[in-house]
Amino acid sequence: MLSRVAERVYWMARYLERAEKTARLINVHTALLMDLPGRMEINWFTLIRLFNAEKVFSEHYERGNEANIMQFLIADTNIRGWKAQA
């Protein structure tokens, strides 16, 4: 029983670490975008490339805009597997 609890705690910590990593990357990317000159194009798709999830993202979303990318990275629970590789 103790080993089962330890395993669950281990995986919970791994998922929490991944969520923290994702949040940190979004925060840093947002801060960098604020420092760009107004004439430069803002590219949110860089975050998808950082997670090496271009294929999975393009299978579920048509456009790589900010709303779709945030949905994909933060809230989309229907897409399984890609976060386990991140």
Image (cartoon, grey):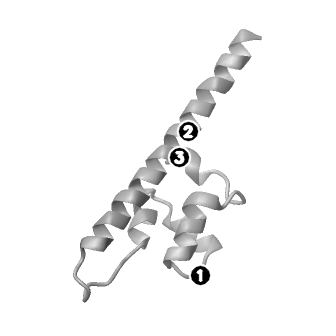
Marks 3, 1: nearer the viewer: 3
Per the image, label 3 sits on a secondary structure element best described as helix
Hey, which residue is sitting farthest bottom in the picture?
39
Hey, which residue is sitting farthest right in the picture?
1
Task: From the viewer's side, name the closer residue of 47 and 52.
Answer: 47
Q: Taking 11 as reference, is 5 above or below it?
A: above
Task: Please give the residue where the numbered disc 3 appears in the rendered image.
Answer: 19
Marks 2, 1: nearer the viewer: 2
The image quadrant of residue 45 is bottom left
Per the image, label 1 sits on a secondary structure element best described as loop
Residue at (72%, 60%) from the top-left corner? 78
| Circle 3 Cα neighbour tier, 10 Å, few/some/many (<14 / 14–19 / ≥20) | some
Task: From the viewer's side, name the closer residue of 64 and 34.
Answer: 34
Contact? badges 3 and 2 (CB < 8 Å): yes
Task: Please give the residue where the numbered disc 1 appears in the rendered image.
Answer: 62
The amino acid at mark 3 is Ala
The amino acid at mark 2 is Leu
Task: Please give the residue where the numbered disc 2 appears in the rendered image.
Answer: 16
What is the x, y in percent for residue 33?
31, 72
The amino acid at mark 1 is Glu
Tell me, yes or no, if residue 83 can be seen here. Answer: yes
What is the x, y in percent for residue 80?
67, 53
Q: Taking 37 as reference, is 4 above or below it?
A: above
